[in-house]
Amino acid sequence: MSNGSDDTAPSSPSRSLTIARLFAGMAMFGSATPVSKIVTQAAPVFIASLLRVGLGALFLAPPAYVKRAHISDISIGDWIRIGLIAVFGMVGFSAFMLYGMRLASGVTGAIVMSTTPAVTAAASMIFLGDQASWRKLTAIALAVLGVLILQLGASLNETEGALLGGALVFAAVCCESTYTLLGKTLTKSIDPVLVTFLASALSIPLFVPLALWQWPNFTPQDFDAGVWSALIWYGVGTLALGSWLWYAGVQKAEGSTAAAFMGVMPVSALVLSYMLLGEAFRWVHLAGFAVVFAGVLLMSWEHASMSEGGAEEG
């Protein structure tokens, strides 16, 4: 997710629209955690994943078609990065997320997923040589502490399968971080929506043989309206529409404004886990989430500071 911005401050109505896009995009990203729980309880993992990327690519096809002239300018190196995004950001993320949410509760998944900014920051420092700061390091420490609090509660109250589920969701977090880092340079020269469409389209043939393998276990005639709604939203909402709104927002927002909305995703995931899944509230959930969310706020502060520093240098 890019935090690019325009130099010209938007007018008040335009700013309100930009803020609405940022909020809605992050809220839709957050909804992926509880919705994936509903999806994986009804459909085989790879069939659900194929439907997700297929619906996402279909929804993104019109805006990507408008940008089709830029496809010929994509270098071989960038095509390789897009292919890796398809492998990690689409295939790896979907598989780990859906298998993990089969075992973990929605709240557990929401809290583990909220470590994404800290994990991405850690990977960026290790693999891309990004400079460490006290805010980044503290956010990483808070993410680890929050998950430890959650896992301590899980070890006392949940099954071994739930712990494995949390670990698989964390693997999805690592795939999401890989997606972000691979896209970091791509979106400077290629429209982000085009990148998302191409990665989604490239992942479809990767899912097809796996989906065919699981096809005998697919019984769509047993799905009710709620399951179909979740399947459609998982592709159109969390992947396509969420990306579209977020990227439309960050293109018009100041970097500090866009960064502040990072906190919407974990809040959305947690609240919707309670609402959609009817899960019982537990204080250990609130404790773990509060610690991790403090790290999310620190990362938002870090992004805002970096944006302001870049503006001053410019």
Image (cartoon, rainbow, N blue to C red):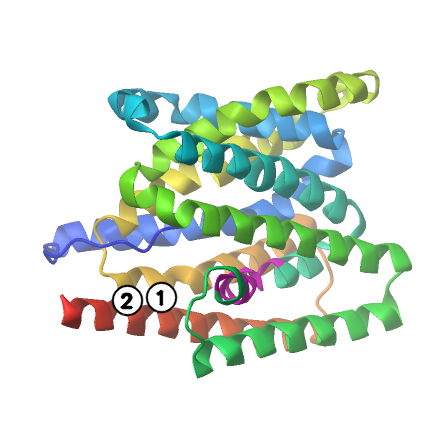
Crowding at dot 2, Cα within 10 Å, few <14 / some 14-19 / many 20+, comes out as many
The residue pinned by badge 2 equals: 256
Please tell me whether the stretch drawn in magenta is mainly helix, strand or loop: helix
In this view of the protein, which residue sits in the foreground, 170 or 265? 170
Q: Quadrant of the C terminus?
A: bottom left
Q: Which residues are magenta?
A: 113-124
The answer to whether residue 272 is visible is: yes
Residue 55 is situated, as x and y percent measured from the top left of the image, at 52, 24
Q: What residue is drawn where x is 42% and y is 35%? A: 77
Q: Position of residue 209 (x, y in %)?
A: 72, 18
Instruction: Answer above or below: position of 120 versus 51.
Output: below
Q: Place residue 115 in its image quadrant.
A: bottom right
* Crowd band around label 1 with a 10 angstrom C-alpha radius: few (<14), some (14–19), many (20+): many
* Residue at mark 1: 260
Residue 42 on image: x %, y % = 75, 32
- Residue located at (36% from left, 35% from top): 193
Q: Amino acid at mark 2?
A: Ser
